[in-house]
Image (cartoon, helix red, strand yellow):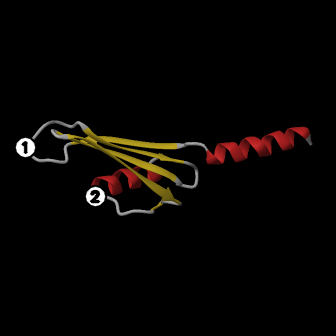
Amino acid sequence: EEFDQRIDLLEKIAAASIQKMGFIRFNPFQNTGGDNSFILVLLDRANTGVILSSLYMREGVRVYAKSIEKGKATHALSEEEKKVLEHTMHNQ
């Protein structure tokens, strides 16, 4: 019985931990700079987590965070973000 309780606790912790990761570097602006921008997707078992996007520009860097709930974004996603999210959910 003690082991069952411990296993239940560990399973709850594992379900809420990061289990899927996706990452891509890209250049959002044609003919300028390099692949200094990136998207990082972090999801749990239920595909709930966050997308972090960093856009590098000559004038500075912008960072965006968007929540993901059961595979659905709470804010509009760019095409690059959609691709990384889909890949992360289905290929890990």
Please give the name of the residue rendered at 30% of the width and 41% of the height, measured from the top-left corner.
Answer: 38
* Residues packed near mark 2 inside 10 Å, few (<14), some (14 to 19) or many (20 plus): few
Q: Which residue is mark 2?
A: 79
Q: Are marks 2 and 1 in contact (CB under 8 Å)?
A: no
Provide the secondary structure element on which disc 2 rests: helix
Outermost residue toward the right in this view: 1
| Residue 25, picture quadrant | top left
Outermost residue toward the front in this view: 59
In this picture, is 82 found above or below 23? below
Provide the secondary structure element on which disc 1 rests: loop
- Residue 82 in the image: x percent, y percent? 34, 57
- Residue 44 in the image: x percent, y percent? 56, 48
Query: How many callouts does the rendering have?
Result: 2
The residue under label 2 is which amino acid type? Glu
The residue under label 1 is which amino acid type? Asn
Is 59 in front, or is 18?
A: 59
- Residue 49 in the image: x percent, y percent? 51, 51
Q: Which residue is mark 1?
A: 31
**Which numbered marker is on residue 57?**
none
Query: In the shown orientation, is residue 66 left or right of residue 57?
Result: right
